[in-house]
Amino acid sequence: MDAFDDLFAANAEFARTFKGSGLTGRAARGLAVVTCMDSRIDPLGLLGLEPGDAKILRNAGARVTDDVLRTLVLGVFLLGVERVLVMPHTDCGMNKATDADVHELTQSKGVDTRSLDFHMVPDQRQALAHDLTRITSSPFLPSDMPVTGAIYDVKTGRLIAVD
Ligand code: ZN
């Protein structure tokens, strides 16, 4: 069996009743969300959003990397983004190890990852403050754009605002 047959079968069903053809690529609710790749997070569902409403940027740890900044600049200037929510989560694997730990693990499996920066997060609040500052202080983004951080609790479904 092909490794992706299940997905194409599900998509055939999805496309049968597809209703999204009227949407554009602009963020209808003017929102971008930076969140983690964690498979427990349903960004649209937990924020009451629908497809078409927001730009969703995901990576390991919800980190504001250079590529996330690049994407936010495009989102703001081309795709209707007017506000940004950075949303890491509880029980994140990124909080459970350091970059050095990961390099050691991969090395034990014969892979040298030392040329990669994993942006691991020993202190979640500190990392979030750092990442919010990367957005608010970016010379490429509007200085008056609303930007906030919140931590999603994967056990309760609640979003906890962070100052
Ligand atoms: Zn995570």
Image (tube, rainbow, N blue to C red):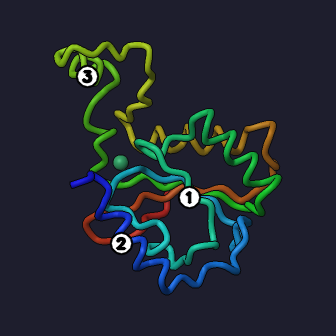
Residue kind at label 3, given as amino acid type: Asp
For the residues labelled 3 and 2, the Cα–Cα distance comes to 38 Å
Residue kind at label 2, given as amino acid type: Ala
- Badge 2: residue crowd in 10 Å (few <14, some 14–19, many ≥20): few
Residue 60 in which image quadrant? top left
- Element type where label 3 sits in the image: helix
The relative height of residue 156 versus residue 13 in the rendered view (above or below) is above
Q: Determine if residue 153 is in view.
A: no
The relative height of residue 67 versus residue 146 in the rendered view (above or below) is above
Residue at the image position 69 percent from the left and 76 percent from the top:
23
- Element type where label 1 sits in the image: strand
Q: Mark 3 vs ligand 1: CB under 8 Å? A: no
Residue at the image position 55 percent from the left and 37 percent from the top:
130
Q: Position of residue 80 (x, y in %)?
A: 77, 63
In the image, 38 versus 94, the foreground residue is 38
Q: Position of residue 104 (x, y in %)?
A: 23, 16
Q: Position of residue 148 (x, y in %)?
A: 60, 57
Residue under label 1, please give it. 56
In the image, 1 versus 7, the foreground residue is 1
Q: Position of residue 68 (x, y in %)?
A: 61, 42
Q: Name the residue furthest front.
A: 1
Residue 116 in which image quadrant? top left
Single out the mark in the foreground, 1 or 2: 2
- Element type where label 2 sits in the image: helix
- Quick one: label 3 or label 1, which is nearer the N terminus? 1
- Quick one: label 3 or label 2, which is nearer the N terminus? 2
Residue 45 in which image quadrant? bottom left
Q: Are marks 3 and 2 in contact (CB under 8 Å)?
A: no
Residue under label 3, please give it. 101
For the residues labelled 1 and 2, the Cα–Cα distance comes to 22 Å
Residue under label 2, please give it. 10
